[in-house]
Image (tube, rainbow, N blue to C red):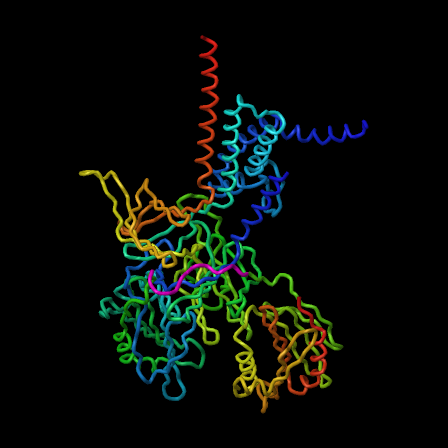
Amino acid sequence: MLLLGLLCAAVGCNKSDDSITAYRAPKEVRPETGAQQPAPEPGAPAGLHWLAPSSWEEQPASGFRKGSFLVRGGDGQTADVSVISFPEAAGGTLANVNRWREQLKLPPVTEEAQAGSSFPVAGHDMLFVELASEQPLEAKADKTRVLGGIYPAQTETWFFKMTGPDELVAAQREPFKEFLQSVHEEGGAPHATASGDSTNAPTPPLIDTLGAVPLQYTLPPGWKEKPLTPMRVASFNASAPNGKEVDISVVYLMGEAGGDLANVNRWRDQVKLPPIDEPGLQQSAERVETNGHNFLVVDLASSEPIGEPAAKQRIVAAILDDKGRSWFIKMTGEDAAVASQKSAFADFLHTLKFH
Amino acid sequence: MAAPAPTSAFARSPFRVLASLRLTVVCLGLGMLLVFLGTLAQVKSGIHAVQATYFQSLFVFWKPAGANWGIPVLPGGYLLGVVLLINLIAAHATRFQFTKKKAGIICLHLGVILLLIGQLLTGLYARETQMRINEGETVGYSEAAREVELAVIDVTNPEYDEVVAIPEKVIARGGVVQHPSLPFTLQIKRFLPNASLFMRSQVPTAPPSEATVGAGANIVATEQPRTIKDDERDLSAAFIEVTGLSGSLGTWLVSNAIADPQSFTLGDRTFELVMRQRRFPKAFAITLLDFRHDQYAGTDIPKNFSSRVRLVDQERGENREALISMNDPLRYRGFTFYQSGFDNNDTTTILQVVRNPAMLLPYIACGLVALGLTLQFSMHLFGFVKKKR
């Protein structure tokens, strides 16, 4: 029986193998292809660089795009330039050119020679493609033209593409070609090395899943529970006397979650108030002691109407650091509606208990 | 005073069952059946699944198709091993007497007990991983061959990366995951243990992707049955929604087939999401200096595979070269590095990294069994010779 007990204990202990771990690791060169593929030679290109014409407006690159530009023409017309990359051949040049052709409702081509013309750029062949739709793609619109560049680097294929109204894009042909010519590979990113002072020894595992929510509260009169969204551990709404609704959320994050000041400034930004500094926060915020918790409470009202329909907005929020968790209790809505619920919010804070 | 007798008899009877030879025979019989059925099951489920369900388990369950519950139909390897262990110990406690004459038998059985315990500990605590190193490359971690992890990497600091690694079992449970060093939560919307990925342009009829950002929006992921082949690896995928305090940042498709890092920025920090083979960081790093694949002169027959490596351990001030060859592994800090394979035209070595805290037990157990047999045999021999005289 003792042995059986030991067996169960051993099996139980072994479960720690499944916990989340956090550690510091040296920077590494990541192979750009699948897990089974060989890693690139040390010093292989880590990415591409390019030089865009100064008249193009750089846009923030989204997760998918490695580069993004807006090209403005006369009479408010705009064209979009995107740079993306895919591992390996990404389905083949022909398939990609035909995908573009399909977008312009053009028949597919069957030979690579028909796809476009090539010129050498930094040791590889850049395939230049120019396509124009035969008909406008939308009613009351111009025909669409696409300028494209397909560039196979060592482990990735890069796609440069300008899409926009026929005339504007046609006028950008030479700047776009110059843009393609400017493409060059960047030399090695930092390699994983044994030297340096960073160790990659694991730190003790810490895990927190939102299984049981360690929270107790009593709802003030007029507040109603709302369905939870991924971040919220409690969610309510309340109707103000003027019929407007306010939204109340309780959210927590592990650790400091950026700190009080950063979070208050994020909220200030939401109601179009200028950011403040630490002394400013201490001055404007209120401390509320209840059930042994010390909440930092802020009341932020927009100085002018914002949003659609335009109305003055207000955020009343409380932050609590409790046992390694940061709790955020936040009430948002129109200024007058939030004001009407402020005392209920204070009552609610008094009923909150964390375990 | 007659009252206690039935109680002690009652207490003794289960003990007698535990110590009985019949139980030994039943266990050994069931063990043979388990090995037989497990071998047959390998055809359908593959060796790794069978090892887990037949041998590294308390019971073997029969599951009706599509159900998530099962009925235990056979004792598993762990249960049989433990019952045999108890049986052997109980037999010694009740039947065997500790006399000089029985020293050989006791020693032999002690060896068998150690062997059983060693096997149990190996099953529970041993870990086999791999290290794949290109010539000139330095690697400070080993990877699980058949398990993935979701790594959330804070790449903000130019000097190093802060990694939060979420193992496959946590991903498979689904739900919301958060960690003190991450200013957001991760909701695992769907986990595909094995999937095939296609570019959306190749499957125009596919339903819209659950992924809203990153490369996944352009990729179609279809679930596949897990591979049972020893030389194949699952390509796992998962849809992960990242939610910060200001709301959802989008849903990403991560997969160990997408090695391209998918990054996003929150506040002044940049994070990368990568699904990759589960990594086990080491407190030391190994650089592959040279891999050799020697052949017998004039033939293609391999003679020797070896890796010349440099081992650097800053914590212990270790910095030395070592040669790992087929029957000559490197042992360091409880890990054994065996030469296991090679790739890329002999420029990449694959080392099997084994950590087994119970590694010595089988050796001691075999020693004890050998000693026991020798003792027993010698005693009989001497007795026989004496009698003859």
Residue B235 percent coordinates (x, y): 44, 53
Classify B182 as above or below A35: below
Work out whether residue A204 or residue A113 is closer to the camera in this orientation and state it.
A204
Residue A58 percent coordinates (x, y): 37, 80
Instruction: Tell me if residue A143 can be seen.
Output: no
Work out whether residue A315 or residue A241 is closer to the camera in this orientation and state it.
A315
Q: Quadrant of residue A188?
A: bottom left
A355 on left or right of B122? right
| A200 drawn magenta | yes
Classify B385 as above or below B134: above
Which residue is farthest top? B389
Work out whether residue B216 or residue A321 is closer to the camera in this orientation and state it.
A321
Residue A165 percent coordinates (x, y): 37, 80
Magenta segment: A194-206
Which residue is farthest left? B298
| B92 drawn magenta | no
Q: On the rendered image, what quadrant is the N terminus of chain B found in? A: top right
Magenta part, dominant SS: loop
Instruction: Tell me if residue A201 can be seen.
Output: yes
